[in-house]
Image (cartoon, helix red, strand yellow):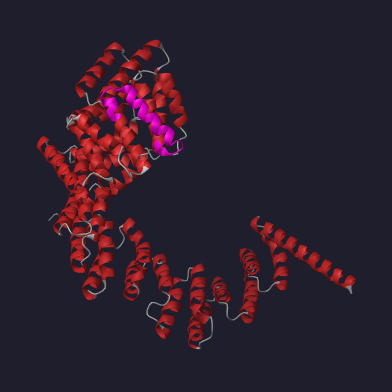
Amino acid sequence: MRSFLCLFICLYVTNAFAQQAEDELAAQFFYNEEYDKAEILYKKLLKKNPESVYIYQNYLECLLKQKSLNEAEKVVSKQVKKYKSKPLYVVDLGYVYGLQGKEKEKKKVYESAVADAVDAMGNGQTGLVSFPEQLASAFLSKQEYGFAKSALIKARKAYGPATLFAQNLIDVYRLTKDYESLINECLLVLNFDANQLASTKANLVFLVDTDTKIDYLQEKASIYVQKYPEKTVYNELLLWVFVQQKKFNAAFRQANAMDRRNKTEGKNLIDLAIIGLSNKNYAVAIKCYDKIIEFGEDGYFYLNAKMGSLETNYKLVSETGQFTPEELTLLVNRYLVVLDRFGRNPQTAKSMKQLSDLYIYYTHNLDSGVNILEELIKMPRLQQKARGTYKLALGDAMLMKNEVWDATLLYGQVDKAFKEDPLGQEAKFRNAKLSFYRGDFDWSKDQLDVLKTATSQLISNNAIELSLLIKDNTGLDSSTEAMAAFAHAQLLLFQNKLDESLEELNQLPFKYPKHALEDEIYFVKAQIYEKQRKYAKAEEYYNTVVKFFGDDILADNALYALAQLYDFQLNQPENALKMYEKIIFDYNSSLFVVDARKRYKVLKNSTQTQKTQQP
């Protein structure tokens, strides 16, 4: 008995290995497109494993590739008779009929399959609720979109519910580019299940990205808002549509109405303000925050709105330079009022840091800015990473005061505390740059070379740029002298001594004519003129870098700076669009590509809207 059992096991294992070898050989022939050889093996394998869809499909493909349509029809017909509950085989039979030119037979098979799918559901057979889905999937694989849609809709109409097979139909509508039906289906789903909002957005977001039927989506969402006022999900969807289209004023009205109607104390407005801020739409962000403040001090988002309004105005100063001395003084006083009212604590730390920046970089009150940063660093219960960030800011302030040793010490502390973290790498970079300012180029370059592999792409890119600058301009003694003068001019710029920095840069071409630093000098001078709000001069020098040094490392920096200049200072959106577009297409490996693409889309939508509104 034991011998018989061992023999049986040996035979079973041998057969299994033999079949595996045949499988592998057939697959090899198939992928090498040796279909005649693969066909022989797959025919044999299908007899042994008639339920294997993988073997069947490869066998059928071999027959079709060799135009053996009659044999293909026999194989598929046999599978249809054996496995009536598998729609794959029925659809394949119709497909083969189509290849044979038997369109009537094909249509009859497909229509019969649709009817059978509906009947299967009606008969209450267990598990067959998915039969129409399987049939639709099989039709889609053969690009028979009309029959796929017919199977799903007829099954839904016959046996409901109203949203049955919704996602399958959405897929069909997307493939057939029937976007109006897709939108209607998505809105129908929300009528029955508000929890599907996230998946609905995922199904519709491509319409926004391609500007396809987006106006129809907005129109239909508005109709549903009016038709079902009790269903807040449609209001949320409409708000999302406005935001995706960058129609921030319409989004503001919608968010404000939603918060008032639902008594949510500004939840939608606060979310919109954050989105507006990230898109540099400061006007809408301020409107949102101011509206929340109107709700009163007892509102849940009151403090967030107060600090958010300050931050938005701070960004107007720091990112656009659009302010008067009087407005700057007013903003500083607003910060002081808020901090007096709500205290100086981890919750208001971000506002304290912004106030210190205003003191240090704009009112040139270094001591007041330093005092705030020192207060932040000593603040109890502050997160260590935030403390490290404020130490870096204090190091910068010390460097502006020309207290180099203190700056180096602070940078070093952060570097040591956050060794492998981007914050620590940023500290190391600032220390390396400080050495560059002081003319210690060898030590600076050694540190920069370490940072070339930094986890932060921005730090890595900055380190590479500065390392290359040092390498290219410190080969000779005379070059080292020129580099030292240029580095000192950079330090003066960092310290906000703009006139002194400009004077030193102006002398460089005379002291060191035809030096390789020419493009760097133009770029830094452009930065200085921009800080001085001499925008025409800044434009001229940025353009010079782009025009004459388009292949050098600073070209994309200058191009992006020029785009920002047109965008936010000179109010020339068409020129800004051209610059952003040039970055996207001509400098597609630049770090600025992502921001350029984002801003390009905003400006493009804005200019198109303005054109359509013109009489």
The answer to whether one can see residue 361 in this image is no
Among the 4 quarters of the image, the one containing residue 149 = bottom left
Q: Residue 432, located in which quarter of the rendered image?
A: top left
Residue at the extreme bottom of the image, as rendered: 123
**Residue 13 coordinates in the image, percent (x, y):** 79, 65
Is 36 on the left or on the right of 505, as rendered?
Answer: right
The residue shown at (69%, 62%) is 38
457 vs 259, left or right, is: right
Q: Position of residue 157 (x, y in %)?
A: 40, 83
**Position of residue 284 measured from the top left corner of the image (x, y, whole percent):** 19, 52
Q: Is residue 112 left or right of residue 220?
A: right
**Quadrant for the N terminus in the image:** bottom right
Judge whether residue 476 is colored magenta: no
Q: Is 453 positioned to the left or the right of 393 in the image? A: right
**Residue at the (27%, 44%) spot, across then down:** 350
* Magenta extent: 396-423
